[in-house]
Image: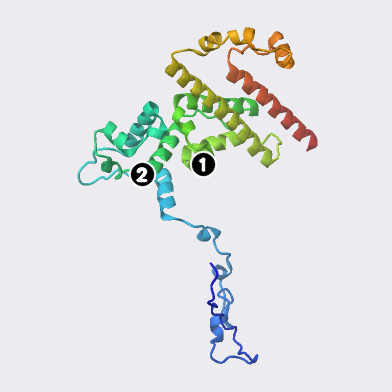
Amino acid sequence: MASNTVAPVPSDGVDSAGRPDSSVDASAHTPADVPAAGTRTTPEDDAAPDPTDQVPRPPEVTRRLALLWDPPAPPTRGRKARLTLDEVVTAGIAVAQEVGLEALSMRRVAARLGVGAMSLYTYVPGRTELVDLMIDRAFGELDLPPADAPWRAGLSRYARQVWALYQRHPWILQTNMWRLPLAPHVLDAQEAGLRTLVDTGLPADQVVEILGLVDAFVRGLARAAVAETVENDVSGMSSDEYWTSMSSFWADWFDVERYPVMTRIWEAGGFDAPADPFDASLDRLLDGVEMTIDRAREQA
């Protein structure tokens, strides 16, 4: 909003005529990092300011991160707590497994534990922090590739472990995967994935890009597999049964002249599903990564 008020301008030590302004204390305008004449400086004075001192630290963010990286120890004095933080996280995962993450609430978790909802706030500030802890607990199940694994074997193991994780905990896929919590086990997984590619000769940006491509591939196929499982449960009809029920389409509606390429590929067996579509697709993806690595090494 515009304002007619003119903000006061600090004096620069001269009056309107350009003469020194005796009403201004010159020392007040000496930069803080310039020592006064005759003052000796120390190495501490010359040290650059710590950039982390300038990082904003909202209290809610600090509380959220501290719960992940430095959770409070159980009290050793007084009355024994009825629950532990681990039990609350376990209950949260159980609820998410049963009803999905969207239906997860502090009230549902409390009911599972047999306590009042307000009791949970003794352990976690709210639902957001609880979901952070649940995700980190789940990622702790990953059997990550060792540091000395060849890149292809290591990246393949990473992808298969994450795929299996999503099959066990499909509720994770209901979160914003671009905002996974900055949690120990989540970062452990990312570290292991990056480690598989960092010494292949790829530029650093391509290391990050390729791991992101693998992650997106696994997430996309996992979401489709989870959706298929849900559809099977709701309809009581397997995927094969569904497509069999739709088979009249090919005889009554499909036009080979309109879709000649599709017809050609169909007749050549191109749509025959592999025994394990995840493995087959992952192998094709890793073949592409291998070609990218070979090209980077040739250009080095």
Residue drawn at x 43%, y 13% is 236
In this figure, what is the number of numbered marks? 2
Residue 256 in the image, given as x and y percentages of width and height: 71, 12
* Left or right placement of residue 120 versus residue 281 in this view: left
**Of 219 and 47, the residue lying toward us:** 219
Mark 1 and mark 2 lie on one chain; the one further toward the N terminus is 2
Quarter of the C terminus within the rendering: top right
- Figure check: 15 above or below 166: below
Residue 10 visible in the shown view: yes
Give the numbered dot on residue 126. 2
* Residue at 75% from the left image edge and 30% from the top image edge: 294
Q: What's the residue at 74%, 13% (across, down)?
A: 257
The outermost residue toward the left is: 79
Relative image position of residue 38 (x, y in whole percent): 58, 83
Q: Residue furthest right?
A: 299
Q: Residue furthest front?
A: 252
The front one of 93 and 220 is 220
> What color scheme is it?
rainbow
Q: What element carries label 1?
A: helix
Dot 2, crowdedness within 10 Å: few (<14), some or many (≥20)? Answer: some
Vertical position of residue 204 compared to residue 282: above or below: below
- Give the residue type that dot 2 points to: Gly
For this view, does 100 lie left or right of residue 54? left
**Front in this rendered view, residue 202 or 209:** 209
Q: Residues within 10 Å of mark 1 (few under 14, many from 20)?
A: few
> Between 219 and 270, which is closer to the camera in this rendering?
270
Tell me: 216 left or right of 270: left
Q: Where is residue 253 in the image (x, y as percent from the top left)?
A: 64, 12
In percent of width and height, residue 254 lies at: 66, 12
- Asked whether the viewer can see residue 198, the reply is no
Disc 1: which residue: 179
Amino acid identity at mark 1:
Arg
